[in-house]
Amino acid sequence: MPPSTSISALKPRRFSERYGVRSAWKIGASASAGAGIVIARAALAPDGCSRYSPIMAEKSAPGRASSAKSSGGKSSRAPKPAKAPPAIPYSPADVEEIFRRLHVQRPNPTSELEHYDPFTFLVAVVLSAQMTDVGVNRATRRLFPLADTPAAMAALEPERIFELIGNVSFARTKSGNLVKLSRRLVEEHGGVVPRSIEALIALPGVGPKTARVVLNTCFGEKYLGVDTHIFRIGNRLKIAPGRTPDEVERNFLAIIPKPYLAPAHHLLLLHGRYVCKARKPDCPACVIADLCRADEKWNSEPAPLIRLPDHPPGLQGTPQAKGELPRTDGEAEASV
């Protein structure tokens, strides 16, 4: 018969006994301001017992902080230089030719979201998050006959908007945001969509990408709202590689020739949507196949360079495609 063991002997030892350190609060009390403390992280071991592994919390730099305060809040560190664009396997002439061909193919690129002024486009873009343009158009065809101005939208209850746009993702949240942003437009901007990126981002439900797309499409501003298609082209073709949409936008804007800055957003988006697709790029239909440096490329013969219809397939037969809906001056600028 094995020797008996007292209950007290089975009691797990305290953290301080096992690792030879004092309790976390004692360490914090005795340590200098800003010093890191030891934190015990519990994990369940295979035998069902708790094991503790001490990890160090992120430390601040009290010396630097105090020196910054003593010098009037200014840091002695020199500002970091601007990050240079990455090296790409394209010459400036190659980049110029790529955008020239895309522009010849689509001289008047535009959004597939149905709209007829900056406000209706803003609403459509807000609804487009994690949605297809086809699904958004289905919703706005029910919504716009009832409310297509900030004042009319602000007068609706979120529940009523939800009934009209129920097919879109996060419809309840987006319904509330449409009412809030419409009220802000009426109260702070006279019912007009602002042309400032800061003012747009301040609106409920409007993020940096939405603001850039609105400014580019409605006012011809030289922004590039990087969506999944533009992000894919930048990295797949190695023409504007980046780990984030902001990085891809920055690298694209550094190389896009000035004449193509305004239409670049829709040129790249439509090329990614219909030709350089996510699962399998349609290389035989690509007009820049001979210039492309993508690893996935399986054809190097460029497609014939012919002009496509002014409006993408998603707008064929709609009032916007037929020219029955008014275009703003900004839209006219953007399509030149």
Image: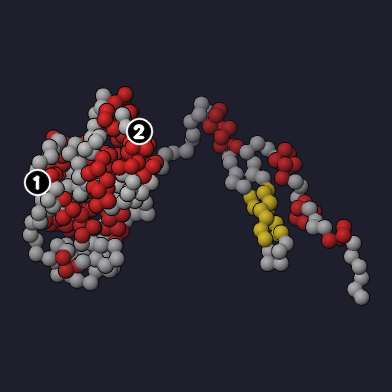
What label sits on residue 322 in the rendered view?
1
Q: Is residue 23 left or right of residue 224?
A: right
For image coordinates 32% across by 32% down, the residue present is 156
Relative to 84, is 290 above or below? Answer: below
Q: How is the image coloured?
A: secondary structure
Q: Quadrant of residue 240?
A: bottom left
How many numbered dots are placed on residues in this image? 2
Q: In this orientation, does residue 20 appear?
A: no
Mark 1 vs 2, N-terminal side: 2
Residue 228, percent from left and from top: 31, 54
Relative to 71, is 30 above or below? Answer: below
Depth check, front residue: 12 or 248: 12
What label sits on residue 58 in the rendered view?
none
Amino acid marked by disc 2: Glu
Q: Quadrant of residue 236?
A: bottom left
Quadrant location of the N terminus in the rendered image: bottom right
* Secondary element type, mark 1: helix
Depth check, front residue: 166 or 64: 166
Q: Given the current orientation, which residue lies at the most extreme left position?
A: 306
* Secondary element type, mark 2: loop
- Depth check, mark 1 against mark 2: the one in front is 2
For image coordinates 91% across by 68% down, the residue present is 4
Residue 137, percent from left and from top: 23, 47
Q: Quadrant of residue 67?
A: top right
Q: Which residue is mark 2?
A: 157
Q: Residues within 10 Å of mark 2 (few under 14, many from 20)?
A: few
Amino acid marked by disc 1: Lys
For image coordinates 12% across by 51% down, the residue present is 317
Q: Residues within 10 Å of mark 1 (few under 14, many from 20)?
A: few
Residue 45, percent from left and from top: 68, 64
